[in-house]
Image (tube, rainbow, N blue to C red):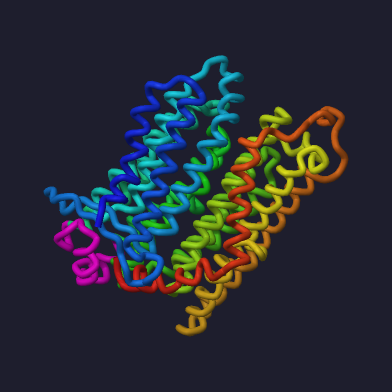
C-alpha cells in the first residue's frame, strides 16, 4: 500500500506552513483549498485502494515505524471512514465560505490576517483528521490536543465578544477533559501491555471487569467534555457562539462528535465488560443531553447560541447510539455524525449569512427574510430537516438506526429501564422539531421589518457551500444504497474489536 493517509494528514500541515507567509486573501484561500482538497482526495484514494467500502472486513493500514510506545501509523476502516470523510469534506467546503465571511470580519476589526487564519485553520483540520485515523492511543492523544491548540487561538484572535475569556474557558474545560481521558488511556495501555489498538483489541479484554469499568468511566467523562454532554457542557454555548462563524461550522459539526468516535473505538471496541457496566448510564446521559440542549435552544434569541445548544442536544443522540449495545445503534451513531455534520455546518453558515447581510444575530430583529434570501432560507430549512431526522435527509436514517438499535436491545435483554429511557429519548427528540420550526418561522416568515427591506442574497462563494452540503444530505437520504455498507462495516469494526 502507498502512504495516502500520511499524505492526507500532512498536506494540511504543509499547507499551514505555506499559508503563514501569505497575507493575500486569494492566495491564502487557494493554498488552504488546495491542501484540504488534495487531502480529501488522498483519503478517498486510500478508501478505494484498501477496498474499505467494497468489503466490510477490509482495513487500510499504514505503518511508518516503531517508537517506544508502539508503532506509529494511520488506519481507515468502517468506523473511522465516515468520521474522516466528514472532517475532510467540511474542512474543504468551509475554506471557500471562510473567504467572504472573514473579509467581513476583518473589516469589522480593521485589520487583515489571512495568513494567520488559514495557518491555524489547516492545523485544526490536521488535528481532527489525525485523531480519527490514529492507530495508537498516544498518537490519538497527540492529535486530540492538536485540535485544541489552533482552535483556541482561532477563537482568541478572531472571535466575538469577550473572546479572550471565552477562549481560555474553552481551553481549560477541554484540556481537563483530555487529561481525564489520557489517565484512562495510560492505565489501559500499561495494564494491557501496549498502546497499539491492534494489540489492545486482544489484551484489554483480559482486564478484570472492575478495572475496565474504571477506564470506561475515565473515558466517558473525558470524552463527555469534548462532546459537551449534559453537565460537562458549560464551555460550548460560549465558545461556539462567539467563535468566528466558519470555525463554529467546524467546532460543532466536526470536532465535538470525535468524542463519540473515540467512545466507539475505545469503549465499545476494547472494553466489553466495562462497556456493559456503563452503557445504561450512557443512555440516561444521552437522554438528559437531548432534553437539556433542546429546552435551552428553545429559549435563545441569538441564532448562533441557539445552534450551539442544538449541538449539545444532537450529541445526546450520538450518546444514545453509543449506549445501545447494538450494531444498528453504533451505525446510527456514526451516521448521526454525518447527518449532524452536514446539517449543522449548513446552519452555522446560514447564521453567518444573516450576520453579513443583516448585521444582527438577534432572531427577534429578523422576520420575513424568505422573500429577500430565498436560497439561504431553503438551505436553512434543509439543514434543520437534517438534524430533525426528517425524510428525505440522511438524518432520518441515522435516527432510525439509533432508536431501532436501542429499542431492540431493550426488548432483547428484557430491560424495562432501557425501554423507558429509550422512550424518553425518543420523546425528547420532539424538542428538535420545536426549536427548528420555530426558528425558521421567526427568521424567514412573517412580516419583513422595515430595516431589512434592502437585504439581498450574498454571492456564490457563500451560497454554494451551503447548497453543496444540502444536496449531499438529501442525496444520502434518497439513495440509501450509498449507506448500505454502513452496518456491515460497523459489524466488522466496533462489533469485532478495535
Q: Position of residue 300 (x, y in %)?
A: 68, 43
Give yes or no for residue 29 being in the magenta stretch: no
Residue at the spot x=56%, y=50% of the render? 311
Residue 285 visible in rendering: no
Report the residue at 21% width, 56% height from top. Answer: 187
Expressed as whole percent of the image width and height from the top left, the position of residue 10 reads: 31, 41
From the viewer's perspective, tell me whether residue 72 is left or right of residue 46. Answer: left
Evaluate whether residue 198 shows in this view.
Answer: yes
Q: Residue 477: percent from the left, percent from the top? A: 60, 64
Q: Quadrant of residue 59?
A: bottom left
Residue 211 inside the magenta-drawn segment = yes
Dominant secondary structure (helix, strand or loop) of the stretch shown in magenta: helix
Dividing the image into 4 quarters, which one contains the C terminus?
bottom left
Image height check: is 51 above or below 467? below
Is 201 on the left or on the right of 104, as rendered? left
The region drawn magenta spans 190-214
Q: Residue 359, relative to residue 473: is it above or below?
A: above
Q: Residue furthest top?
A: 110
| Placement of the N terminus among the 4 image quadrants | bottom left
Residue in the image at 22% along x and 66% along y: 204
Instruction: Please tell me which residue is depicted at 61% across the width and 20% down the height of the picture.
Output: 108
- Left or right of 205 in this view: 429: right
Looking at the picture, tell me which residue is in the foreground, 419 or 457.
457
Residues 267 and 348: in front is: 348
User: What is the total number of numbered labels drawn onto the structure image?
Assistant: 0
Amino acid at each position: 500500500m502507498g502512504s495516502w493517509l500520511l499524505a492526507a494528514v500532512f498536506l494540511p500541515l504543509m499547507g499551514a506552513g505555506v499559508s503563514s507567509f501569505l497575507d493575500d486573501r486569494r492566495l491564502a484561500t487557494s493554498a488552504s483549498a488546495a491542501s484540504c482538497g488534495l487531502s480529501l482526495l488522498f483519503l478517498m484514494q486510500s478508501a478505494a485502494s484498501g477496498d474499505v467500502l467494497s468489503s466490510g472486513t477490509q482495513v487500510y493500514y499504514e505503518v511508518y515505524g516503531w517508537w517506544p510506545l508502539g508503532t506509529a501509523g494511520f488506519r481507515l476502516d468502517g468506523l473511522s471512514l465516515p468520521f474522516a470523510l466528514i472532517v475532510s469534506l467540511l474542512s474543504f467546503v468551509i475554506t471557500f465560505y471562510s473567504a467572504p465571511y472573514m473579509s467581513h470580519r476583518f473589516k469589522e476589526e480593521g485589520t487583515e490576517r489571512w495568513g494567520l487564519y488559514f495557518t491555524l485553520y489547516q492545523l485544526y483540520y490536521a488535528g481532527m483528521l489525525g485523531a480519527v485515523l490514529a492507530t495508537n492511543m498516544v498518537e490519538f492523544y497527540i492529535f486530540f490536543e492538536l485540535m485544541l491548540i489552533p482552535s483556541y487561538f482561532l477563537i482568541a484572535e478572531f472571535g466575538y465578544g469577550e473572546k479572550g475569556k471565552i477562549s481560555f474557558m474553552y481551553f481549560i474545560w477541554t484540556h481537563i477533559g483530555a487529561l481525564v481521558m489520557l489517565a484512562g488511556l495510560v492505565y489501559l495501555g500499561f495494564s494491557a501491555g501496549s498502546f497499539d489498538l491492534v494489540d489492545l483489541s486482544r489484551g484489554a479484554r483480559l482486564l478484570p471487569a472492575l478495572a475496565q469499568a474504571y477506564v470506561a468511566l475515565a473515558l466517558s467523562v473525558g470524552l463527555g467534555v469534548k462532546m459537551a454532554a449534559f453537565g460537562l457542557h458549560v464551555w460550548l454555548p460560549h465558545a461556539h457562539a462567539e467563535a468566528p462563524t466558519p470555525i463554529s461550522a467546524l467546532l460543532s459539526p466536526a470536532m465535538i462528535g470525535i468524542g463519540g468516535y473515540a467512545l466507539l473505538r475505545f469503549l465499545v471496541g476494547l472494553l466489553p465488560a466495562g462497556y456493559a457496566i456503563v452503557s445504561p448510564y450512557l443512555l440516561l446521559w444521552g437522554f438528559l443531553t437531548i432534553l437539556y440542549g433542546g429546552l435551552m435552544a428553545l429559549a435563545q434569541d441569538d441564532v448562533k447560541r441557539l445552534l450551539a445548544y442544538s449541538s449539545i442536544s444532537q450529541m445526546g443522540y450520538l450518546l444514545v447510539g453509543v449506549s445501545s449495545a447494538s450494531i444498528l445503534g453504533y451505525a446510527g451513531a456514526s451516521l448521526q455524525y454525518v447527518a449532524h455534520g452536514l446539517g449543522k455546518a449548513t446552519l452555522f453558515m446560514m447564521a453567518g449569512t444573516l450576520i453579513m447581510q443583516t448585521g444582527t444575530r438577534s432572531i427577534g430583529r429578523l422576520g420575513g427574510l424568505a422573500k429577500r434570501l430565498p436560497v439561504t432560507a431553503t438551505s436553512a430549512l434543509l439543514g434543520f430537516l437534517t438534524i430533525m431526522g426528517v425524510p428525505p435527509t440522511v438524518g432520518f436514517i441515522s435516527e432510525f438506526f439509533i432508536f431501532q438499535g436501542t429499542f431492540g436491545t431493550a426488548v432483547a435483554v428484557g430491560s424495562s429501564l432501557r425501554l423507558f429511557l429509550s422512550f424518553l429519548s425518543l420523546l425528547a427528540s420532539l424538542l428538535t422539531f420545536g426549536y427548528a420550526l420555530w426558528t425558521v418561522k421567526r427568521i424567514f416568515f412573517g412580516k419583513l421589518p422595515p430595516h431589512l427591506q434592502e437585504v439581498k442574497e450574498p454571492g456564490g462563494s457563500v451560497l454554494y457551500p451551503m447548497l453543496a452540503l444540502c444536496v449531499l444530505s438529501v442525496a444520502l437520504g434518497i439513495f440509501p444504497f450509498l449507506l448500505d455498507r454502513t452496518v456491515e462495516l460497523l459489524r466488522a469494526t466496533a462489533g469485532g474489536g478495535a
